[in-house]
Amino acid sequence: MLEHFIEYSLVDIKILETTDISNYPDVAKIIRDPKDIPILSAAMKYDIDIVISGDKDFVVLGLVKPITVSPAEFLENY
């Protein structure tokens, strides 16, 4: 099923490079878990629309871009 989704999806799926986050130092001020800083920074750097995660630290941010959805929400809505 996942292969079918990826093959026919109109969505660009990107694997994020999280090593260069120096352009987004303010991310540390808005997210609680320091381990999430590289993920959110990379999402912002690459102008990602959606972060697929069940991590509550992302969900409670309430960001408009990138929005955070659970894997189930993503499959249901996209």
Image (tube, helix red, strand yellow):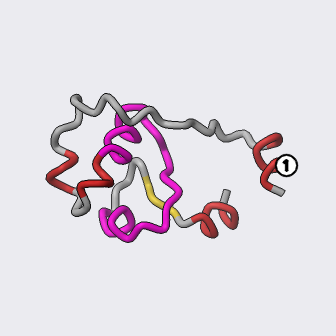
Q: Is residue 14 left or right of residue 65?
A: right
In the rendered image, residue 45, in percent from the top left (x then y), is placed at 36, 32
**Horizontal and vertical percent for residue 77?**
66, 63
Image quadrant assignment for residue 60: bottom left
Q: In this view, does 22 lie above or below 65?
A: above
The residue positioned 14% from the left and 53% from the top of the image is 29
Q: In terms of secondary structure, where does tag 1 sit?
A: helix
Quarter of the C terminus within the rendering? bottom right
Magenta residue check for 77: no
Point out the image quarter for the N terminus: bottom right
Res 56 → quadrant: bottom left
Left or right: where does residue 29 sit relative to residue 4?
Answer: left
Q: In this view, does 77 lie above or below 3?
A: below
**Percent of width and height locating residue 20:** 31, 28
- Crowd class of label 1 (few under 14; some 14 to 19; many from 20; radius 10 Å): few
State left or right for residue 14 relative to residue 60. right
* Residue type at the position of mark 1: His
Q: Which residue is drawn at 44% across and 55% down?
A: 67
Q: What stretch is highlighted in magenta?
A: 38-61
How many numbered circles does the render carry?
1
Residue at the spot 55% in from the left edge and 37% down from the top edge: 15
Residue 57 among magenta residues: yes
Q: Badge 1 is on which residue?
A: 4
Residue drawn where x is 36% and y is 62% of the image: 58
Residue 19 found in image quarter: top left
Residue 54 lies, in percent from the top left, at 48, 68
| Above or below, 71 relative to 65 | below
